[in-house]
Amino acid sequence: MSAFLWGVATGAHQTEGNNLASDWWAIEHEPGSFVKEPSGDAVDSFHRWREDMDLAAGAGFTDYRFGVEWSRVEPVEGFFSRAAIDHYRRMVEGARARGLRPFVTLHHFTVPLWFAATGGWFRTDATEKYLRYVEAIEPVPTDSVEHVGTINEPNIVAMLARRKEGEAPGLSRGLPLPDPRVTDALIDVHHTTRAKLKAAHPHLRVGWGISVQDCQPEPGAESVFATYVHPRDEVFAEAARGSHWVGVQTYTRIRVGIADGRPVEIAGDGPKTLTGWEYYPDALGGALRRIAGVVGETPIIVTENGIATDDDHQRIEYRRAALASMQEAIGDGIDVRGYLHWSVVDNYERGDYRPTFGLVAVDRSSFERTPRPSLRWLGAQHPSRHR
Ligand code: BGC
């Protein structure tokens, strides 16, 4: 069993820049797009990933989560870019050279435009297309990689599939229910990808990270609570039973009330973060407890947790409380194997650069990285150093 993961998480489209062949790039540039601003160069991590990894390793982190971008690897259907695959292989080697364990996400919201334009996850051959991509990137998850995530937040992917113009701008709260057809398709993708990767590389630990908020039933709403949480995240957690790990990605809480016999979200009146989400660091403990009740023996990794704020002191306080709630959950016997902070650098929040989640600030013109005090603070909290 590997040591407790202590790391940072990033996503390809949100940091790399110029993912010209992706569906999001097209959405960002369509006339009247709901997207506030396009991703453009993002924070140029396609070229500056070494700096990002240096900062993470220098602060004491031991794990580095990053994404492989399908639309770079297969920009046109059936054409695979050898150079893109080599790029991600170099990232794996670069992480190891810095003492970081690479944690590879194969899909993080974006798909190639050709795939989206021809039906995306509604295609009957979606799994087949995805597996062909996974096969093409075989040189990436080599012996140096231990953890692989098949699909980041499949529940949000299934919600976004329902997006109609203006109905669900971005990834904030208030998204529609996941589309059940996409839910089924993604569960199939997860199971078949996992089987394929395991057959080729038995050492890999394959799972997926789900958006899990601390959903709390209001008094009187207990009877409808399951109808709220089951299609939104628990069905995806159930599908992870038997995987090597399930990822919990938590930012806030959602209070679930009842109106006309149906579940409704109740807006909190407490302070909000830059994403408009309630400031509620204890959400991590609550989310871990709920999902532990669903996944049985499957170990949990916190694959994302963070806060968008201009105030780095608040970022540290959020972390302090969130980590304490995680430790309490561990103390109560919940099998948590790691913690990855979202994110190492400020990045593109799909549509907006304003919500700053980074332990490191980035100047968007020069791409200069400036570490915030929270980088060193969090790096130094590695649990093994506090035993
Ligand atoms: C996603 C990230 C996102 C973060 C904060 C998660 O939903 O996986 O891509 O940036 O939350 O909004």
Image (tube, rainbow, N blue to C red):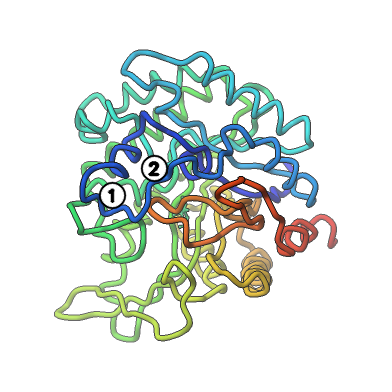
The answer to whether one can see residue 219 in this image is yes
Judge from the rendering whether residue 147 lies leftward or rightward of residue 374; answer left or right.
Answer: left
* Residue type beneath disc 1: Leu
Q: In which quarter of the image is the C terminus?
A: bottom right
Q: Percent from the top left, x then y, of residue 64?
A: 66, 42
Note whether ligand 1 is within 8 Å of mark 2.
Answer: yes
Q: Which mark is residue 160?
A: 1
Residue at image mark 2: 109
Choose top left, top right, bottom left or bottom right for residue 183: top left
Give the farthest residue toward the front. 365
Label 1: element kind: helix
**Residue at position x 43%, y 39% from top?**
151
382 to 283, vertically: above or below = above
Quick one: 55 or 204, which is closer to the camera? 55
Label 2: element kind: loop
Choose top left, top right, bottom left or bottom right for residue 86: top right
Q: In which quarter of the image is the N terminus?
A: top right
Numbered-mark total: 2
Q: Percent from the top left, x then y, of residue 372?
A: 70, 61
Tag 2: Cα neighbours inside 10 Å, few (<14), some, or many (≥20)? many
Choose top left, top right, bottom left or bottom right for residue 322: bottom right
Kindly check if marks 2 and 1 are in contact, taking CB atoms under 8 A apart as contact: yes
The answer to whether one can see residue 141 in this image is no
88 to 173, vertically: above or below = above
Q: How far apart are marks 2 and 1 (CA)?
A: 9 Å
**Residue at position x 63%, y 21% from top?**
142
Q: Percent from the top left, x then y, of residue 191?
A: 40, 33
